[in-house]
Image: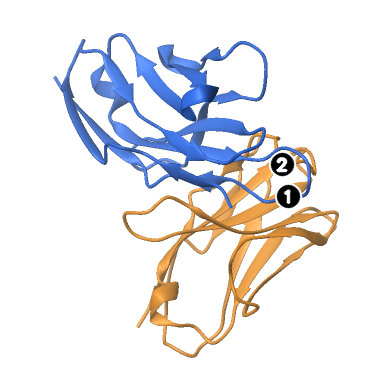
């Protein structure tokens, strides 16, 4: 069984730039969620995708956007990067479109904005 | 909105000691409760979960947690810890149904077990 994989593992960007992070869900999973984990904090829910549509969103501005593809992989896009966007971005997949389905997390992408 | 409070940010114990990590949440309705663990260099993984039924739930590696609705608590316990339990532990909550709100996590507890 292939787990959740994320790429790249590390990334350095400049303020104002745009970034795309990628995630392949665990085999058999059709739902992908993205979380932002700042240093010393717990993960914060960004949004969730099910059947290629966003079906839930946390308290993040519109410059955070995403996609889910027919193979259930996903992208997180962040425009107009700010210094506070520096964090570990976690992708998680699950097998249902319901919130009580346990999540399986990837190792994350460490984004540094300078 | 839901929130989760983990009382201990850093805990240091000796091997064989008993463990209890506190978790309180604020939400007036029915909730699902989780404990996740992140071992050094590894991804977050589910330790145990509570959806309904018996409020005492057992997870992997000898961990258990008790849901006390009147106290809005879901404390994690282990009777005898091992060095390999050194990790970051996160309590999380979400509300079932009504849309995909995602999990609300606490800030985590960094547990260090000394041999």
Q: Position of residue B102 (x, y in %)?
A: 64, 49
Q: Dot 1 corresponds to which residue?
A: B100
Nearer-the-camera pick, B3 or A98? B3
Query: What letter labels the chain drawn in orange?
Result: A
Q: Residue furthest bottom?
A: A16
Q: Is residue B99 left or right of residue A78?
A: right
Q: Chain of mark 1?
A: B
Chain B image colour: blue
Q: Position of residue B59 (x, y in %)?
A: 51, 17
Q: Dot 2 corresponds to which residue?
A: A99
Q: How is the image coloured?
A: by chain
Nearer-the-camera pick, B109 or A3? B109
Image quadrant for the C terminus of chain B?
top left
Q: Position of residue B91 (x, y in %)?
A: 45, 36
Whether pointer 1 and pointer 2 mark residues with C-beta atoms closer than 8 Å, the reply is yes
Q: Quadrant of residue B97?
A: top right
Q: Position of residue B78 (x, y in %)?
A: 35, 14
Q: Name the residue rendered at 28%, 10% in the picture.
A: B80
Q: Quadrant of residue A59?
A: bottom right
* Residue B16 higher or lower than B3, as above or below: above
């Amino acid at each position: 069984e292939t787990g959740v994989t994320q790429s790249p593992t590390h990334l350095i960007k400049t303020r104002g730039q745009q970034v795309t992070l990628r995630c392949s869900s665990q085999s058999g999973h059709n739902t992908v969620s993205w979380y932002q984990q700042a240093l010393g904090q717990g993960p914060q829910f960004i949004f969730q995708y099910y059947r290629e549509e966003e079906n839930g969103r946390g308290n993040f501005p519109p410059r955070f956007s995403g996609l889910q593809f027919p193979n259930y992989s996903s992208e997180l896009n962040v425009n107009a990067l700010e210094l506070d966007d520096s964090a570990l971005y976690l992708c998680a997949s699950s097998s249902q479109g319901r919130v009580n389905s346990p999540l399986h997390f990837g190792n994350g992408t460490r984004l540094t904005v300078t | 909105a839901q929130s989760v409070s983990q009382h201990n940010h850093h805990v240091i114990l000796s091997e064989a000691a008993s463990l209890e990590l506190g978790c309180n949440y604020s939400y007036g309705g029915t909730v699902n409760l989780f404990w996740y663990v992140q071992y050094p260099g590894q991804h977050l993984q589910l330790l145990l979960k509570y959806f309904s039924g018996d409020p005492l739930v057992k997870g992997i590696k000898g961990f258990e947690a008790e849901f006390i609705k009147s106290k809005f608590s879901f404390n994690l316990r282990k009777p005898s810890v091992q060095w390999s339990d050194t990790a970051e532990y996160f309590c999380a909550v979400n509300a079932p149904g009504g849309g995909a709100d995602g999990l609300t996590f606490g800030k985590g507890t960094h547990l260090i077990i000394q041999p």
